[in-house]
Image (cartoon, helix red, strand yellow):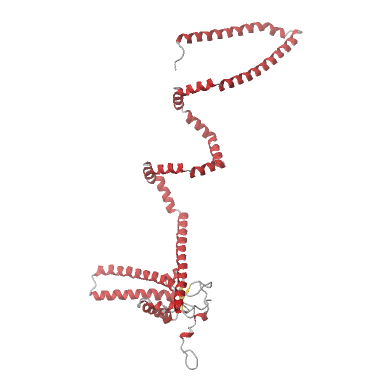
Amino acid sequence: MSGTRIPYAGIATRAVALGIDAVLSQGIFIVGAALLGLAGSLVGELRPAWLVAFLAAAGWVLTGTTYFAGFWAVTGQTPGMRLMRIRVVARDGAPPHAARALIRVVGLVLAIIPVFAGFIPVLIDNRRRGLPDFLAGTVVVYAGAELALDELAPDESLVTRDMSGQPS
Amino acid sequence: MSGPGPSARDAADLAGGLALMGLRLGGAAARIALRPARVATRAPVVGPRLRRAVFDLRADGATARIHGRAQLESAVAEVLAAPEVERTLDRMLAGPLTEALGRSLGEHRVVERLAGELVQSGAIEDALTAALEHEDAQRLFESALASPGLERLLATAFESRLVPELTDRLLHSPEMHAVLEYVATSPEVRRVLTEQSSSLADEMVGGLRTRTESLDDAAERTVRGWLRRPRPAAG
């Protein structure tokens, strides 16, 4: 381990934070679904079954999206990330806006679908970014790390340039 | 142990009575004999000489008394140190006297009275304080704690059937309920418990963070090593 601490959060810390958040968001969904199911059973059984499955899936997506995008947009930290003392920041050093947070949620899903392969770039990228970060233009840093704004500027290697040499 | 017979006792009593009567008669005769001497001490010429002679006699008597006491003391010490006294005492203690003495001590509550008197006077408290403050007592206590004998004794005591019974009685006692209620409702105890719990949780999470950060670096180093892509200098 080098003497200087890298400000960007690595794959293990992010994995632990994601695991904690997954448990919490699933817990919230299960409790909410149970309460709704209890309330529904008082007024009558919901039919047909596909509608129940659709509503459950929609509720699951909504819960997850609200949980992750909400926490990222408001504080830059989900509870799991807070516990692991890491945070998401946009290029201006502030928590990402709602739109950027939503894009990051989409990126998170896309990164998880191929057996978490979307997180492999974290191991080789100089800013330890994964697919969600590339899509949303964010980085994940340790909460106590000091970051200069120029460090958060777009990566030169990823910026396409026109014939005049200006970034496009 | 059989004592002397009735006839021997009667003879001894008679001898004692005769001796006492002799002493009384002697004393009365001496008083009668000294009466003229007392009158003579008040006479003008003979009186002072007689008083001086009486003074000298008193001084001689006092010296003889002191000397006699010293001799008596040494004689008593000699008697007490004699093997006969030791044997006599041994026989007395081996006999029924010990039991009789114990019964008498119990009947008259001698031990309780003595203990009460000692407690009231504060002598026991002073003695206990002095004993506890003495460094020898501390050393003795430490060596007792370290001894295997005490360990065995405690193990036996804990295995005793009295322990569950005592524990049960203790747990159901009102005093224990009061103590538990105090502990459960005490703000100080709650504060300490909260502090300890939060510091334990902080320690656990801190340890987890340190480990995952080490793992971050190790994983990245390994993959970059495979790809022969060194990490640029940080900071």
- Please state the horizontal and vertical placement of residue A135, each as a whole percent of the image: 41, 82
- Please state the horizontal and vertical placement of residue B127, each as a whole percent of the image: 55, 37
Q: Is residue A56 above or below residue A166?
A: above
In this rendering, the count of numbered labels is 0
Q: Is residue A1 above or below residue B189?
A: below
Viewed as shown, does residue A149 lie left or right of B60? left
- Please state the horizontal and vertical placement of residue A2, each as a whole percent of the image: 52, 72
Q: Is residue B83 above or below residue A16?
A: above
Nearest the viewer among B137 and B28 is B137
Q: Is residue A51 above or below residue B97?
A: below
Nearest the viewer among A17 and B157 is B157
Q: Quadrant of residue B53?
A: top right
Going 43% across and 53% down the picture, which residue do you hit? B185
Q: Quadrant of residue A24?
A: bottom left
Q: Residue furthest bottom?
A: A163
- Please state the horizontal and vertical placement of residue B3, each as a whole percent of the image: 46, 14
Can I make out residue A76 in this image?
no
Nearest the viewer among B74 and A82 is B74
Can I make out residue B179 in this image?
yes
Going 57% across and 20% down the picture, which residue do you hit? B79
